[in-house]
Image: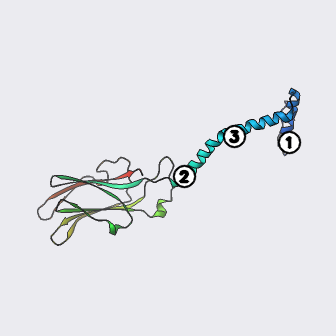
Amino acid sequence: MRLDGTARFGAHGVAQAQSTDRHRCARQGADPETTLTQYALKLRHRNLQLLPIFCIAALGLALLPIAAQASAQLQCTFDVNSETHQTVHKVATDPYTVAAVPLGNRFRFKAIVLSAAQDAAQGAAPSAAQPAPTAIESVNLYVYYNTRRQPMVMQHTQYLQPLPLRNPAPDALTGRVAVYSPLLGKELQYHCALAEVAP
C-alpha cells in the first residue's frame, strides 16, 4: 500500500485492491462486507442496463453476412419509327437463355449482362451501411435487322467489367448510338445505362 492510500497492483493485485477497499470502509465506519456487496450490486445493475444494447449489436453483427446485395440492371431506351421503347435487362448467368426484344417490325435487340464468378464476387465483404453490387463480368449488346429468312446481326458491342452506378445518366454506359438498316436506311437510336438497384 502506498502512502497516498492507493493500492499497488502486482501479482496479487486483486487481493491488495480488496484489502484496500476493506480498510477504507473500516476507516469510514461502514461494514466492509456490506459496502462491497452494494458495490457489486451497482455494477450488476449497470451491466443489466447495457445488456439490451449488447444484444442488439450482436444481432446486427449476426445478420451482417445475410445483408442483401444491391443488384445491377441494364436500362435502355430506343427510338425507332417515331416510337420510344424502354427495356430493363437483368443479370444473367447463362447467356444462351437471354431472348432478343423486338423493336418495331425491323429491329431486334439483345442485352446479355453476365455476372462475375461467385468466388470473385464474395472476395470482398460488403459493409453494413453500403452493400456491394453484384460484380459484372461483361455486357454484350446485339442489334439485329429482321430479314425474310432470319435476323441479321448489325452491331455487337462488348463492355468488360463495367461498374453499376447508383443514379446514372440515361446514356452512361453506351452514349447515344444510331444504327441504320442495310436496305432502306431506317434508323434505330438507343442509349443504355448500367444501374445499381437496391434489393
Q: CA distance from mark 3 to mark 1?
A: 23 Å
Label 1 near label 3: C-beta < 8 Å?
no
Where's the N terminus, which quadrant?
top right
* Nearest the eye: 3 or 129: 129
Q: CA distance from mark 3 to mark 2?
A: 24 Å
Circle 3: element type: helix
Mark 3 vs mark 1: give the one in front.
Answer: 3
* Residue 157: mark: none
Residue depicted at 16% across the width and 57% down the height: 187
- Residue 152 image point, x, y percent: 20, 68
Residue depicted at 38% across the width and 55% down the height: 72
- Say whether residue 46 is left or right of residue 120: right
Label 2 near label 3: C-beta < 8 Å?
no
Q: CA distance from mark 1 to mark 2?
A: 42 Å
What's the residue type where badge 3 is placed?
Asn
Q: Residues within 10 Å of mark 3 (few under 14, many from 20)?
A: few
User: Which of the two labelled residues, at mark 3 and mark 2, occupies the earlier sequence position?
Assistant: 3
What's the residue type where badge 1 is placed?
Ala
Residue found at the far top of this picture? 28
Q: Residue 2: in sight, yes or no?
A: no
Residue found at the far bottom of this picture? 149
The residue indicated by pointer 2 is 63
Q: Is residue 41 above or below residue 129?
A: above
- Residue 47 image point, x, y percent: 69, 40
The residue indicated by pointer 3 is 47
The residue indicated by pointer 1 is 15
Circle 2: element type: helix
Q: How many marks?
A: 3
User: Which of the two labelled residues, at mark 1 and mark 2, occupies the earlier sequence position?
Assistant: 1
Q: Residues within 10 Å of mark 1 (few under 14, many from 20)?
A: few
